Image (cartoon, rainbow, N blue to C red):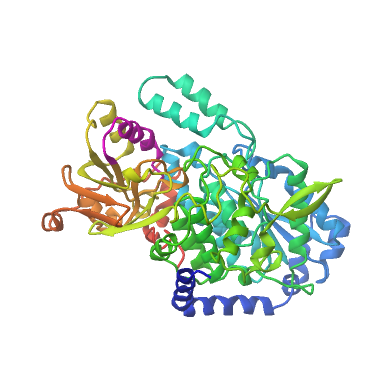
């Protein structure tokens, strides 16, 4: 093992000793109560299977037939989740064939940041993760179940499902993806057209036509944002079938994988001889493997928030220093948009996650001695599925990349370091995603231009007031202020200015996420403005330094800033359901602590 990875893992274990022990004690107590339905009264149980068929009622009346809880994020508006409509029937059919039962335990909300970008609804986005966690707990609280299958794919959904499931860590849990849509308009062309629109060279009709050609079918968006980073994460943590993340929906292979994971999770219940609960899979080494997967593939910055919250739900304490130290020794092995021009379908065809896991294990960059839904050892994930005579079989994952413009081995990485950098200084602490930024733009020192809304920035651009070197400062966008929305509305405009030769950067206590692009952006600044963060005291003209090389995030003139009052305009707290989330805003932790409601 790489010594830095060993050291970081050891300090996480030591740091988490008390909280992890408390979590495992709670889960052990739940496991020792025996099969869940054994604790139910006859009246409880009768309510639990009243709507079942005769066969399932008979099976569930005892405590020796396993029952799978299906928790799904299905809705038919969002492309990524629409394929889940047919999954419950397939899971139930497979469970019946295995002498088991499956019940649809509950649904969780699934909102799309692509729909809400720049809209009022985005203020609910990050908090939807904790709503999903709570909804998952409600679904499982009936205590009818011996295993769980989580059907979710996009930004907040997978983290929320996992956080909720970890409260039921005595049950085996697996994740079931739907896969990405087939490739449409290339991501490079999509980005070009967005900048053309921002530049005023094309109209809305042409922009909509391009967006519709890019997002055009059932399945996940094909760029490597948070949704597809989620799928990577579940594989690196052993909670999803190997090389199954990027199999397209509506295919025979996709259905075969869904049936197979049903059989796999049934084999891990405490009614059999191979009991393997979620709590024994999600441990400190699995969390470190997840961070390494994120860094090596150039994944979403949202996981510097979500992974912290996931770890905390399992009694594990991590912070941004852990990400930064690991990034220094983890090579960047993938170029997938926005870090390159390829999409996830191209990445999968080039060798995908199976190739990366295999190569990283060979180079001592992943913990091999972990539990997975397949059993012990991450080497079980160095394989990929295929169909032979309509039967699911497994073969060794590629050991060489089929396209080194997309995917490379550790010995020839795109970069010797991972895709993220911690920057810190008198402005606070923040994350910079460098994997998509040209090294010539890694450091910017320029005067601040302060904006209180995204629209104010766009108006200044349209008025010609941004034709200069500057650092855009957008504060009042943290979890306590307005739920920490993503700020992609700024990306094409900053890109245009950079293309014109100006040195530009962004500093914000909001998010940019997996679609973070070619602009140097210090995001998720902590402490946020409404928590007396220095970012709220910046004024136009203050000299700001953002440097991914040295890890600096600073503003000149400490003595002046110390005596200033914060300049924060609170976002509207009503409309689009925002009034229902007052308690969330009041309780939310910092970005570095996971922006969570839960202690």
| Region in magenta | 485-504
**Along the viewing direction, whichever of 343 and 587 lies nearer the viewer:** 343
Q: Which residue is drawn at 56% across and 71% down?
A: 283
Q: Quadrant of residue 204?
A: top left
* 336 lies left or right of 165: left
Could you tell me residue 94's position as x and y percent? 82, 54
Could you tell me residue 372's position as x and y percent? 66, 66
**Along the viewing direction, whichever of 469 and 512 lies nearer the viewer:** 469
Whether residue 326 appears in this view of the structure is: yes
**Along the viewing direction, whichever of 518 and 371 lies nearer the viewer:** 518
Magenta span dominant secondary structure: helix
- The number of callouts visible is 0
Q: In which quarter of the image is the C terminus?
A: bottom left
- Up the image or down, 322 lies above or below 15; here it is above
Whether residue 299 appears in this view of the structure is: no
Q: Residue at x 78, y 42 (%)?
A: 252
In the rendered image, residue 199 lying in the magenta stretch gets the answer no
**Along the viewing direction, whichever of 395 and 423 lies nearer the viewer:** 395
Could you tell me residue 481's position as x and y percent? 33, 51
Q: Residue at x 56, y 29 (%)?
A: 185
Q: In which quarter of the image is residue 82?
A: top right
* 316 lies left or right of 36: left
Could you tell me residue 88's position as x and y percent? 74, 49
* 116 lies left or right of 343: left
- Up the image or down, 71 lies above or below 313; here it is above
């Amino acid at each position: 093992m790489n010594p830095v990875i060993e050291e970081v893992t050891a300090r996480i274990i030591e740091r988490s000793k008390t909280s992890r022990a408390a979590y495992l004690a709670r889960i052990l107590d739940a496991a020792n109560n025996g099969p869940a339905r054994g604790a139910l009264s006859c009246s409880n149980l009768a309510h639990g299977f009243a709507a079942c068929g005769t066969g399932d009622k008979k099976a569930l009346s005892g405590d020796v037939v396993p029952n799978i809880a299906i928790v799904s994020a299905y809705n038919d508006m969002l492309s990524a989740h629409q394929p889940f409509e047919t999954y419950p029937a397939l899971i139930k059919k497979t469970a019946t064939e295995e002498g088991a039962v499956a019940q649809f335990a509950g649904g969780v909300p699934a909102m799309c940041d692509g729909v809400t970008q720049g809209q009022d609804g985005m203020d609910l986005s990050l908090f939807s993760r904790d709503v999903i966690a709570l909804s998952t707990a409600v679904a499982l609280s009936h205590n009818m179940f011996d295993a769980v299958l989580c059907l979710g794919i996009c930004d907040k959904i997978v983290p929320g499902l996992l956080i909720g499931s970890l409260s039921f860590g005595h049950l085996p849990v697996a994740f079931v993806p739907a896969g990405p849509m087939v490739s449409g308009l290339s991501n490079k062309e999509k980005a070009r057209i967005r900048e053309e629109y921002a530049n005023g060279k094309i109209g809305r009709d042409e922009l909509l036509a391009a967006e519709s050609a890019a997002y055009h079918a059932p399945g996940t968006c094909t760029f490597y944002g948070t949704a597809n980073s989620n799928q990577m994460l579940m594989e690196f943590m052993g909670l999803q079938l190997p090389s199954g993340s990027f199999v397209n929906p509506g295919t025979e292979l996709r259905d075969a994988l869904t049936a197979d994971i049903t059989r796999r999770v049934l084999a891990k219940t405490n009614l059999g001889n191979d009991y393997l609960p979620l709590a024994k899979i999600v441990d400190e080494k699995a969390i470190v493997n997840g961070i390494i997967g994120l860094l090596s593939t150039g994944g979403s910055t949202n996981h510097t928030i979500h992974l912290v919250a996931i770890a905390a739900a399992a009694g594990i304490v991590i912070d941004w220093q852990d990400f930064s130290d690991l990034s220094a020794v983890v090579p960047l092995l993938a170029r997938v948009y926005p870090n390159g021009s390829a999409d996830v379908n191209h990445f999968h065809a080039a060798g995908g996650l199976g190739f990366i896991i295999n190569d990283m294990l060979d180079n001592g960059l992943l913990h091999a001695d972990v539990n997975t839904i397949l059993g012990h050892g991450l080497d079980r994930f160095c394989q990929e599925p295929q169909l032979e005579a309509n039967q699911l079989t497994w073969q060794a994952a590629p050991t060489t990349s089929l396209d080194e413009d997309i995917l490379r081995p550790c010995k020839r990485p795109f970069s010797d370091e991972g895709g993220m950098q911690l920057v810190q200084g008198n402005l606070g602490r923040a994350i910079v995603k460098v994997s998509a930024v040209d090294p010539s733009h890694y450091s910017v020192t320029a005067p601040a231009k302060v904006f209180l809304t995204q629209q104010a920035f766009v108006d200044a651009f349209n008025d010609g007031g941004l034709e200069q070197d500057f650092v855009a400062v957008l504060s009042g966008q943290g979890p306590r202020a307005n739920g920490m929305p993503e700020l992609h509305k700024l990306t094409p405009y900053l890109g245009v200015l950079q293309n014109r030769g100006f040195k530009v950067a962004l500093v914000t206590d909001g998010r940019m996420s997996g679609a973070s692009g070619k602009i140097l952006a210090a995001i998720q600044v902590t402490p946020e403005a409404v928590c007396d963060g220095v970012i709220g005291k910046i004024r136009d003209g203050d000299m700001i330094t953002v440097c991914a090389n040295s890890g600096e995030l600073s503003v000149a003139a400490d003595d002046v800033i110390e005596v200033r009052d914060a300049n924060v305009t609170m976002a509207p707290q009503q409309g689009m359901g925002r009034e229902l989330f007052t308690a969330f805003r009041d309780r939310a932790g910092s970005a570095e602590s996971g922006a969570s409601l839960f202690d």
